[in-house]
């Protein structure tokens, strides 16, 4: 089984406080900082929102320390079969990133990378690799649409199906059958419980 690796978030540098534009001359700085340019896999363009919260005082002698929480809104997912450097910042892609950056002028653009553990630019790719890459992209799009219903790949493709009352269904479509299936799939387990969830087998 291929075990892809996740890397990110990687802040995309912008030029200008008002224009907030992606500039090609900054790409070398970006790749030099994160060093994943020769890897292959899938990438996700997202916008980050930083929220500052106060931590809970553990004892009467401890001080409240600010806690920084990062929240992300995913917008685009695409494959990078050649390499991240060659596939992430194509001109037609940058235009789409730029549109989101203008619309979300209080958020910061970031990239997430999910890369193959062994293959890099120049390595021979098998048909299995390309199939796994498409499956990975489909999974990331479907999962990310829980947080942003408009998430798609960079060709505008979105999932064309849903399950009423479970995923991408209309509101009010839940019944005892969909609730039971959600329970079986673990969709209704609170996030805190999921962190400590173990298989019964």
Image (cartoon, helix red, strand yellow):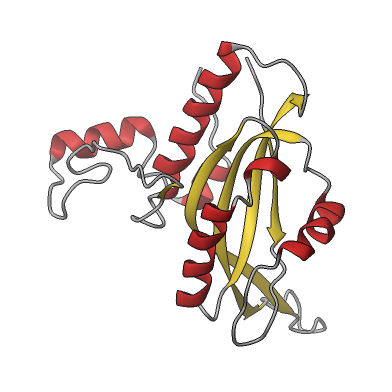
The extreme right residue here reads 32
- Residue 163 horizontal side relative to residue 189, left or right: left
Q: Residue 105 appears at what percent x and percent y?
A: 52, 80
Q: Is residue 92 above or below residue 128?
A: below
Q: Is residue 161 above or below residue 154?
A: above
Q: Residue 196 appears at what percent x and percent y?
A: 58, 41
Q: Residue 176 appears at what percent x and percent y?
A: 14, 38
Q: Residue at x 33, y 43 (%)?
A: 158
Q: Residue at x 69, y 64 (%)?
A: 12
Q: Is residue 120 above or below residue 156?
A: above
Q: Residue at x 77, y 43 (%)?
A: 37
Q: How many marks?
A: 0
- Residue 5 horizontal side relative to residue 61, left or right: left
Q: Residue 143 appears at what percent x and percent y?
A: 43, 43
Q: Quadrant of the N terminus?
A: top right
The extreme front residue here reads 91
Q: Is residue 103 above or below residue 27?
A: below
Q: Based on the displayed image, in which of its 4 quarters is residue 18 positioned?
A: bottom right
Asked if one can make out residue 73 in the rendered structure from this viewpoint, the answer is no
- Residue 138 horizontal side relative to residue 23, left or right: left
Asked if one can make out residue 115 in the rendered structure from this viewpoint, the answer is yes
In front of the other: 36 or 49: 36
The extreme bottom residue here reads 18
Q: Residue at x 63, y 42 (%)?
A: 87
């Amino acid at each position: 089984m291929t075990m892809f690796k996740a890397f990110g978030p990687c802040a995309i540098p912008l030029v200008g406080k008002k224009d907030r534009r992606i500039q090609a001359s900054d790409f070398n700085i970006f790749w030099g900082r994160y060093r994943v340019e020769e890897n292959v896999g899938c990438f996700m363009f997202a916008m980050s929102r930083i929220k500052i919260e106060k931590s809970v005082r553990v004892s009467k002698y401890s001080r409240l320390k600010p806690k920084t929480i990062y929240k992300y809104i995913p917008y685009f997912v695409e494959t990078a079969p050649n390499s991240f450097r060659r596939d992430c910042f194509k001109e037609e892609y940058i235009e789409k990133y730029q549109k989101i950056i203008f619309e979300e002028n209080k958020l910061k653009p970031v990239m997430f990378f999910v890369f193959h553990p062994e293959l890099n630019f120049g390595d021979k790719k098998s048909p299995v690799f390309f199939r796994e890459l498409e499956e990975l992209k489909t999974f990331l799009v479907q999962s990310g649409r829980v947080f942003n219903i408009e998430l798609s790949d960079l060709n505008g493709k979105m999932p064309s199906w849903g399950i009423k009352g479970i995923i991408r269904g209309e509101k009010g479509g839940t019944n005892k059958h969909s609730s039971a299936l959600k329970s079986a799939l673990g969709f209704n387990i609170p996030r805190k419980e999921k962190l400590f969830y173990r298989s019964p087998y």
